[in-house]
């Protein structure tokens, strides 16, 4: 990508999109296009068509998506499959129709089967049943992957797809009703510390293992792949190491400075037993994660204290 190429970051206000904007600007790219939902609603085909017709971005990072944790995914499946199918279908098609040179689609590690072998390789896609609690979201993401591959095969459109592992970092969603595991843990432990509560309740048994990638590392990987990778096969993006939810919660206690006990509500679902990506393909291309989990959580907690009003007032 030329430093003066026009680059559209779809979803620039989200966790991944904001990190991509930071990374691109830090690298000296001068024409990063940003649009809010109020300006261009990506679920509305006519608005997306008009945007691409007038702006004609050369490169597109598809970071816009409706996302959420176990609770949101298990109770609002219709919203997740409808909105994500609309967003990605509109953007991929309009980008091709209006001459984009390349598009990068952001998927998710939840596309892999619930009982997939560990670590999960790119070839494991569609080899078994999905995790039921987030199946609608996963199916939408798989459709996005297949749409990109089909547009590459039929039209020669250079679409690449990146599958990130669990993400965290500045700009995350800390709403307990629809956040992912790390921001939810941070919020719960922080609130318990402020309240002087003797315990913190954690959903599930604490035994599932998860891999966590700092969003700034993902943004770096995405730009790296946009510049160096042009194949139809998906690429996993992660750190190649996992940790149990119990271990993550204990680490969060240290970061926040909370001395109470953890209580695990075993009546709540655990989700997939283990999710660890095989990142040998990305590593083989020359990229590796740089930010450790402890380092990343410390900086994320500092961001939380400085940017979340309730946290900042009572810190």
Image (cartoon, rainbow, N blue to C red):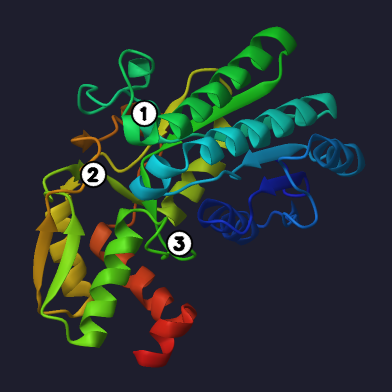
Which sits earlier in the primary sequence, circle 1 or circle 2? 2
93 in relation to 201, above or below: above
- Say which of marks 1 and 2 sits in front: 2
- Say which of marks 1 and 3 sits in front: 3
Q: Quadrant of residue 184?
A: bottom left
- Which of the numbered marks, if any, corresponds to residue 210? 2
Residues under labels 1 and 2: Cα distance? 22 Å
Disc 2: CA contacts within 10 A as few (<14), some (14-19) or many (>=20):
many
Q: Nearer the viewer, residue 116 or 211?
A: 116
SS of the residue at dot 3?
A: loop
Left or right, residue 172 beside residue 149: left
Q: Is residue 282 visible?
A: no
- According to the picture, the residue beneath numbered tag 1 turns out to be 284
Q: Quadrant of residue 280?
A: top left
Q: Quadrant of residue 279?
A: top left
Which quarter of the figure is the N terminus placed in? Answer: top right
Which sits earlier in the primary sequence, circle 2 or circle 3? 3
- According to the picture, the residue beneath numbered tag 3 turns out to be 172
Which sits earlier in the primary sequence, circle 1 or circle 3? 3
269 in relation to 82, above or below: below
């Amino acid at each position: 990508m030329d430093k003066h190429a026009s680059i559209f970051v779809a979803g620039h206000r989200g966790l991944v999109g904001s990190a991509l904007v930071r990374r691109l600007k830090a690298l000296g790219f001068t024409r990063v296009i940003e649009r809010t939902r109020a300006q261009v609603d990506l679920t509305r085909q006519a608005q997306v068509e008009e945007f691409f017709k007038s702006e004609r971005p050369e490169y597109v990072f598809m970071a816009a998506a409706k996302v959420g944790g176990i609770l949101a995914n298990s109770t609002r499946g219709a919203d997740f499959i409808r909105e994500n199918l609309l967003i990605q279908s509109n953007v991929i098609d309009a980008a091709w129709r209006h001459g984009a040179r390349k598009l990068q689609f952001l998927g998710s590690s939840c596309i892999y089967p619930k009982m997939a072998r560990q670590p999960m390789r790119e070839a494991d896609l569609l080899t078994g049943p999905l995790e039921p609690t987030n199946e609608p979201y996963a199916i939408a993401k798989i459709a996005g992957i297949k749409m990109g591959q089909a547009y590459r095969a039929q039209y020669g459109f250079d679409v690449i797809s990146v599958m990130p592992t669990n993400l965290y970092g500045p700009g995350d969603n800390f709403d307990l009703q629809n956040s992912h595991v790390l921001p939810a843990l941070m919020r719960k432990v922080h609130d318990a510390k402020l309240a002087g509560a003797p315990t913190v309740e954690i959903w599930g048994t604490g035994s599932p293992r998860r891999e966590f990638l700092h969003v700034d590392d993902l943004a770096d990987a995405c730009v790296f792949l946009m510049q160096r990778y042009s194949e139809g096969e998906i690429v996993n993006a992660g750190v190649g190491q996992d940790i149990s939810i119990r271990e993550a919660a204990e680490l969060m206690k240290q970061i926040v400075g909370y001395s109470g006990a953890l209580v695990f509500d075993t009546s709540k679902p655990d989700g997939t037993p283990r999710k660890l990506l095989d990142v040998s393909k990305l590593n083989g291309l020359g990229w590796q994660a740089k930010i450790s989990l402890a380092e990343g959580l410390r900086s994320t907690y500092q961001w939380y204290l400085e940017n979340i009003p309730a946290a900042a007032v009572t810190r």
